[in-house]
Amino acid sequence: METLRQTLQYFWHNLPAILVLTRQHLTLVGIAVGVAVLVGVPIGLLIVRFKPLAGVVLSVATVLLTIPSIALFGLMIPLFSLIGQGIGAVPAITAAFLYSLLPIIRNTHTALTQIDPGIREAGRGIGLTFSQRLRLIELPLAVPVIFAGIRTAVILNISVMTIAAVIGAGGLGTLILHGIGQSDIRQLINGAVMVSLLAVVMDGLLQSLEHVLTPKGIR
């Protein structure tokens, strides 16, 4: 009970700083996943259109996801040191972006390949072009599965981004890192709880957004 009391006291006394770290954490994850959506969804569309590419692209994305996070962050340091950005947000965002690609590409590919062929034929039958079928029929039907991939990427990277504190990117990992380094259980618990809460809140918000964007007929 004493530990809990001290942890709560630390939280209230340091709330402004914790909120700043939370905002940093969410910004890093948001940029990484946002860019991954802009890149990953078109790649998913591409490998649906050109099927021989699917195996290669999904295999490369899978390999990226299997690299331990601390190792991937470490690999980013010498790479971005070439442009003077070896420490900080740029390598952290890049690593998280790479981790985000697999769930987004895979779910986009899966969502589009599972659409009933009869629906595509109906679109062709009324004279819709490929881009029109994609925009008006296939993507709206694929929204739930694509969003599942985006939610997976967000939750994964909220956790992974805690490692970014090691390379000076900030975020809630700073609390955890300081807690370990200073043997301060208060910082460690606050950091871990805030990361968990952030993941739960973001998952709920994305579920709500998915509901809004999903056509009423397939909810």
Image: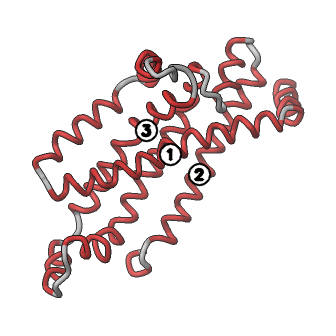
Give the residue furthest to the left: 52
Q: Position of residue 130 (x, y in %)?
A: 19, 71
Q: Give the number of the mark in front: 2 or 3.
A: 3
Dot 2 and dot 1 residues touching (CB under 8 Å): yes
Instruction: Give amino acid for label 3.
Output: Phe
Image quadrant holding the C terminus, namely: bottom left
Against 5, residue 36 (above or below) is below
Q: Position of residue 197 (x, y in %)?
A: 66, 44
Disc 1/disc 3 C-alpha distance (Å): 10 Å
Instruction: Give the labeled residue for mark 3.
Output: 97
Instruction: Give amino acid for label 2.
Output: Met
Against 126, residue 2 (above or below) is above
Q: Position of residue 96 (x, y in %)?
A: 46, 35
For the point 47% across and 17% down, the residue is 81
For the point 41% across and 51% down, the residue is 37
Image quadrant holding the N terminus, namely: top right
The colouring scheme, among rainbow, by chain, secondary structure or one colour, is: secondary structure
Residue 177 appears left or right of 16: left
Disc 2/disc 1 C-alpha distance (Å): 8 Å
Give the residue furthest to the bottom: 126
Quadrant of the rendered structure where residue 42 is? bottom left
Instruction: Give the labeled residue for mark 2.
Output: 202
**Looking at the rendered structure, which numbered label has been put on residue 154?**
1
Which numbered disc flags the more N-terminal residue, 2 or 3?
3
Which numbered disc flags the more N-terminal residue, 1 or 3?
3
Dot 2 and dot 3 residues touching (CB under 8 Å): no
